[in-house]
Image (tube, grey):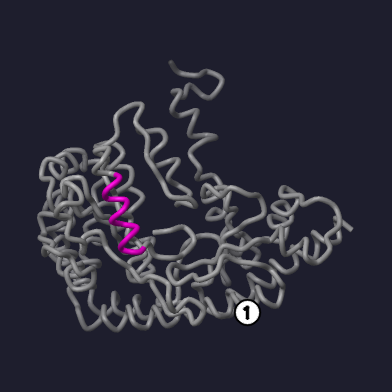
């Protein structure tokens, strides 16, 4: 029944107003810092974006992009062009070490990996079903999963852990969905040389472990190629044609853009470009991590150790403030209010299933001057907090 109090919205529509988990995301983007167009905007070190390779990627796109009129129409259908699905299969076979080669018909293209989650929820989840998630988790899962049916600490799951999860899923006949969106954003951390590197579920021989029809992987261009705005992701399912057909039948409202499809295909077909891009990206991520970690040490702010994947560090601002003799009990809402006033955004770990107030996610995968400006603003927030609590 529609709610007149909330503009005639359905119960689901009303729930989105408070429970979908995207409000902070939209508020930041609505007033995001841009040096020329919005210099007083919010400087975000919270959104999981990587702009370290944007110059190279834009140059490549501008130099190579060509498209036929076929992709101004419905193209090859709503599950991605034949060219892009073949390019993704080729790329995954080169970088994910699958036991069985991925074929183009195993690939379903989506409007990013968030959209892939949404489609999975529709196809795999019945009313009353639940989703088991490792914590901390991607903050938008509540919106992707709740209304419809990698390790958040920046480390890779080991092969042994993945096999244990497969056995658990086999025991209870649960689908195992592996979000591998940061697959190639694994980098060298001198403090975590023994940390596991990336292992794809596709690279594990599932014989005697799990029914392979229960295993699916997701990947996209948003993280490993710093192209969140391209909105190209995919679901890879090698052993469940019924599942793939169900995805195809609901994909009309999730139709990837023809131009974005062709840009992604051109990139992923070019082995020389992608090899050089991935190597340079990993090196720059490692450099960004070193900058952020050095600031945290100077500020005596603890952070989760041994990170070697992704774009961010989990930091304990509460402990850092306590270590500086902040005085009264920690005030989480005061700290967040001061961040808003000082026009800097870092993500609250509570939005990712975090268990304690005071933990935040700081993204470091931007040019050094941008990161240092954001950290300077955050330092001002901490100083203002201490003054308010003195």
* Nearer to us in this view, 252 or 359: 359
Q: With 4 as the anchor, is 390 left or right in this view? A: right
Question: Is residue 160 a member of the stretch shown in magenta?
Answer: yes
Q: Which residue is mark 1?
A: 294
Across and down, in percent, residue 179 comes to 33, 55
Q: Residue at x 29, y 84 (%)?
A: 276
Across and down, in percent, residue 351 comes to 55, 48
Q: Residue at x 69, y 66 (%)?
A: 378
- Residue 322: image quadrant is bottom right
* Nearer to us in this view, 219 or 153: 153
In the image, residue 147 sits, relative to residue 289, either above or below, namely above
Location of the C terminus by quadrant is: bottom right
In the image, residue 267 sits, relative to residue 163, either above or below, namely below
Location of the N terminus by quadrant is: top left
Across and down, in percent, residue 19 comes to 51, 36
Across and down, in percent, residue 212 comes to 16, 49
- Residue 261: image quadrant is bottom left
Q: Element at badge 1?
A: helix
Question: Is residue 248 a member of the stretch shown in magenta?
Answer: no
Q: With 87 as the anchor, is 319 left or right in this view? A: right
């Amino acid at each position: 029944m529609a709610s007149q109090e909330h503009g005639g919205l359905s119960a689901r529509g009303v729930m989105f107003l408070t429970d979908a988990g995207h409000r902070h995301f939209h508020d930041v983007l609505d007033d995001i810092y841009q040096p020329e167009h919005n210099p007083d905007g919010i400087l975000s070190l919270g959104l999981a974006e990587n702009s370290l390779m944007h110059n190279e990627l834009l140059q490549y796109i501008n130099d190579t992009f060509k498209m036929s009129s076929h992709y101004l129409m419905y193209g090859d259908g709503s599950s991605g062009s034949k060219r892009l699905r073949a390019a993704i299969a080729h790329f995954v076979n080169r970088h994910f070490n699958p036991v069985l080669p991925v074929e183009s018909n195993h690939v379903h293209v989506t409007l990013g990996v968030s959209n892939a989650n949404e489609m999975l929820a529709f196809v795999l989840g019945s009313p009353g079903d639940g989703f088991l998630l490792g914590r901390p988790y991607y903050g938008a899962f509540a919106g992707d999963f709740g209304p419809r049916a990698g390790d958040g600490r920046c480390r890779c799951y080991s092969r042994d852990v993945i096999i244990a999860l497969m056995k658990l899923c086999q025991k209870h006949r649960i689908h195992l969905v592996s979000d591998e969106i940061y697959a190639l954003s694994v980098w060298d951390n001198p403090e975590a040389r023994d940390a596991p590197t990336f292992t794809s579920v596709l690279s594990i021989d599932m014989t005697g472990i799990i029914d392979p029809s229960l295993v699916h992987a997701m990947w996209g261009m948003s993280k490993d190629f710093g192209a969140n705005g391209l909105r190209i992701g995919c679901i890879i399912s090698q052993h469940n044609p019924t599942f793939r057909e169900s995805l195809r039948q609901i994909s009309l409202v999730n139709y990837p853009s023809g131009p974005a499809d062709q840009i992604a295909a051109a990139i992923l077909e070019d082995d020389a470009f992608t090899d050089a891009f991935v190597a340079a990206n990993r090196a720059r991520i490692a450099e960004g991590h070193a900058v952020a970690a050095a600031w945290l040490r100077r500020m005596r702010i603890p952070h989760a150790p041994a990170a070697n994947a992704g774009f961010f560090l989990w930091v304990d601002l509460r402990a850092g403030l306590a270590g500086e003799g902040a005085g009264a009990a920690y005030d989480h809402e005061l700290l967040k209010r001061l961040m808003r006033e000082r026009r800097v955004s870092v993500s609250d770990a509570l939005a990712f299933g975090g268990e304690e107030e005071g933990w935040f996610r700081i993204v470091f995968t931007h040019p050094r001057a941008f990161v240092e400006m954001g950290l300077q603003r955050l330092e001002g927030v901490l100083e203002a907090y201490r003054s308010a609590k003195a």
